[in-house]
Amino acid sequence: MRILHTMLRVGELERSIAFYTEVLGMRLLRRQDYPEGRFTLAFVGYQDEAHGAVLELTHNWDTASYDLGNGFGHIALAVPDARQACDDIRARGGKVAREAGPMKHGTTVIAFVEDPDGYKIELIQRD
């Protein structure tokens, strides 16, 4: 078994696709409209679905926004340099929610950014 994808419901699909592709550097892997159900699915990731987990962005046409709730935590991405990643993301219009630095009670360097819907993405510095 392996993880295939994580699904996020998003308010504005084009805005979310732009964030994940232009700000975080993922690729749009596939997109499918379902007119009868009034929703669109878009899959984004750093590698093809056959080789790694991806994000499924679900846009329900009649829903402009969602409550994030308190059960969802975050998506985590490995980066070679968390400070540089924050600078790059900020330069591309992304929101840095926590600057790079050691995690609380540890030494691993992490940072947090937010997507346009407010979902948290943790950047974990890895060699």
Image: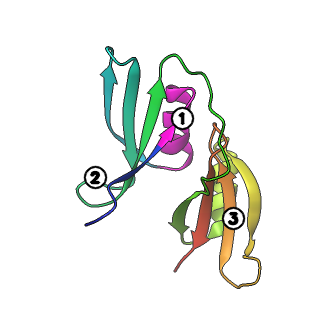
User: In the figure, residue 123 lies in which quadrant?
Assistant: bottom right
Residue visible at 63% across and 43% down? 92
Identify the mark at residue 49; answer none if there is no mark: 2
Q: What residue range appears in magenta?
A: 8-25
Task: Point out the tag, 1 or 2, that comes first from the N-terminus.
Answer: 1
When the figure is inspected, residue 90 is found, relative to residue 103, above or below; the finding is: above
Residue shown at 70%/85% (left/top)?
Answer: 107
Q: Residue at x 69, y 64 (%)?
A: 111
54 shown above or below 123: above
| Residue type marked 1 | Ser
Q: Which numbered disc covers residue 16?
A: 1
State how far apart marks 3 and 2 are (Cα): 26 Å
- The answer to whether residue 118 is left or right of residue 15 is right
Residue 116, image x, y percentages: 64, 37
The amino acid sitting under disc 3 is Ala
Residue at screen point 54% across, 77% down? 126
